[in-house]
Amino acid sequence: MTDDVIRFGVSMNRRLLDGLDRLCRRRGYASRSEAIRDMVRERLVEQEWEGEDEVAGTITIVYDHHAVSGPDLLNEVQHRYRQLIVATMHVHLDHDNCLEVLVVKGRPAEAREVADRLVSAKGVKHGRLTTTSTGRNLA
Amino acid sequence: MTDDVIRFGVSMNRRLLDGLDRLCRRRGYASRSEAIRDMVRERLVEQEWEGEDEVAGTITIVYDHHAVSGPDLLNEVQHRYRQLIVATMHVHLDHDNCLEVLVVKGRPAEAREVADRLVSAKGVKHGRLTTTSTGRNLA
Amino acid sequence: MTDDVIRFGVSMNRRLLDGLDRLCRRRGYASRSEAIRDMVRERLVEQEWEGEDEVAGTITIVYDHHAVSGPDLLNEVQHRYRQLIVATMHVHLDHDNCLEVLVVKGRPAEAREVADRLVSAKGVKHGRLTTTSTGRNLA
Amino acid sequence: MTDDVIRFGVSMNRRLLDGLDRLCRRRGYASRSEAIRDMVRERLVEQEWEGEDEVAGTITIVYDHHAVSGPDLLNEVQHRYRQLIVATMHVHLDHDNCLEVLVVKGRPAEAREVADRLVSAKGVKHGRLTTTSTGRNLA
C-alpha cells in the first residue's frame, strides 16, 4: 500500500544535526521527520512543475480597480481559462487596491499561461504564480 | 500629485530591445512601458518585504484533511493570528486533498511567522508564502 | 546594425518613478536606463536557460578536502565533463574547507548535469549553479 | 565532539519515499542520507545569509570589455573592497565578452554591497551574487 509508513536511518554530524534542530525550533516543526518530509516535498513539487502532469497553483494579483482596463479584461481572461480556474477570492485592500487570488489546476504550461495573461494585464500592479501540488503524489 | 504620469527616455541597443520586444509578446504585455513598469514593481515589492511597513501576501497550503492534526490545529493557528488574516478560501482538490489560500496583511516578519506555523503543521503537505504588496506604494 | 542605440519613451506614475530612483541610488546605478537594461537582461537570461542554445554559468562548491571522496571524485567528474568546463579556481577557506568555482559553457541541460554531479558528490557541503549568459545575445 | 556522526530515524510514507529515491537517482546522490544532508545545508546557508556572521559567496559578472567604463571601474571597485575579495578568475568568452568570478568572504551586507557595485557598473551585461558558506558551520 502506498500509505505504509517506512522508517529509515539518516546519519549526520553533530554540528549539522544541531543546525537542523535549530531550524525545527525556529520554524515550529514538531519533529525532524516532519521538517525533512517538508524539504523532500518541496523538491518534488519543483519537479512536478517541470513535467506535464496536472499540478495545482495559485495566482495572486494586486490591482487598482480604477486603472484596470475594465475588470472586464480580468474577467475575460478568467472566462477564457475557466477550465483551469477552480475558484477565486477577492479582497478589498483599501479604497483603490484589490487583491485577487485564483486557484488553478492543470498542466504546468497552461497554468503559466493564465498567470502571464493576468500579470501582464494593464492595471495589474503586481502578480505572481505560486506553484504547489494537487497533493496526489505527495504522501 | 503622485498620480502624474511622467515620460522619460530609455536607451537600449537594438539587440537588447529586440529581446525586450520578444519578451513582451511572449508574456502578453501591451507595451514596453507596461513590461518595464512590471519589472520595477517586482523589485520594489522585494524591497518592501525587507522593510518594516505593512505588506500583503498569500499563504497557500495543501493538506490531507484526514491527516492534518485536527483541522483544529489549522484553525487554532488562524485564530491566533486573526488580525493578520484578512480572508481565507478553501478548495477540495480531491477526496483527500484540500488547498487553502489565506490573504495576510501585516509586517513582513509577522506574515512570515504565520506562514511558518501553517507550513510546518503536521499533515500540511506543501505550503508557501507569496509576497506581494498592499499596492499603496506601487503606482 | 545590432549595435545601434535606440531611445524610446517609458511612462510611469510619479510614485513608481520615485521608487525606481530610490532603487537606482541604493544599488548604485548611474542612470534609469542602466537599471532598466539590467532588469531586461535578467529576464532574458532566465529565458536563455529555458532554451537549447549555449549558455554560460558558474558552479560554486564548498567542501572539506578531508571528507570529499577523494579529490579524485571531483577530478573525475571534471574530466568527464571537460568540454563544458572552461576554467576552475580554487580557494582555501580555512584548514579544512575549500571553495571551488567552475566556469561552464554549454547547453542548459548539460550545465545542470555537471552541477548535479558535483553538488551531490560525497563531501561537498554546499553547491550551487549560477546561471548567466555568454553575453552574445545581451547587447 | 562536533564530528561525531549521529544516526536517527526518519519516517515517511511509501509514496514520498519513492519520490525521494527518484530524486536521489536523478541528481546522482549515493544515499538518502547524503540527499537529506544537502537539503538541510541548503536551508542553513539561507539562514547564514540572514545573519551577521562571516559567509562566503561568489560574484559572477559578464561584460563586454570594450563597453565597460574602463576595466578601470571594475578594478577600482575591486580595490576598494579588496579585504572582502579573496580571489578572482577571468574567462574570455569570445572576442568581446568576458566572464569574471570573484570569491568574496565577509558579512552578508558587505558581500551584497560589492555585488551591487559590480552588477550595476556600466558595461556589465549580467551579474549575480551566489550565496554559499565558509563551511565552518556545515558539518
Image (cartoon, coloured by chain):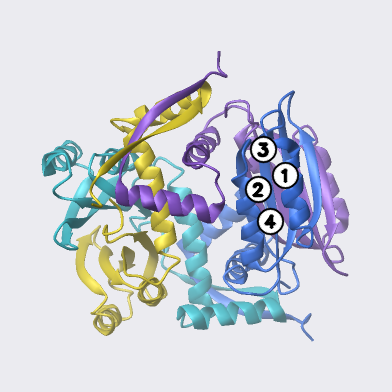
Chain colours: A blue, B purple, C yellow, D cyan
- Nearest to viewer (mark 2 / mark 3): 2
Image height of D100 relative to C58, above or below:
above
- Nearest to viewer (mark 4 / mark 2): 2
Q: CA distance from mark 3 to mark 4?
A: 21 Å
For disc 3, the marked residue is A62
SS at badge 3: strand
Residue under mark 4: which chain is it in?
Answer: B
Q: CA distance from mark 2 to mark 3?
A: 10 Å
Q: Are marks 3 and 4 in contact (CB under 8 Å)?
A: no
For disc 4, the marked residue is B127
Q: CA distance from mark 1 to mark 4?
A: 26 Å
**Upstream in the sequence, badge 2 or badge 1?**
1
SS at badge 4: strand
SS at badge 2: helix
User: Measuring 75% from the left and 61% from the top, which residue is drawn there?
Assistant: A84
- Nearest to viewer (mark 3 / mark 1): 1
Q: Are marks 4 and 2 in contact (CB under 8 Å)?
A: no
User: Measuring 17% from the left and 36% from the top, which residue is drawn there?
Assistant: D80
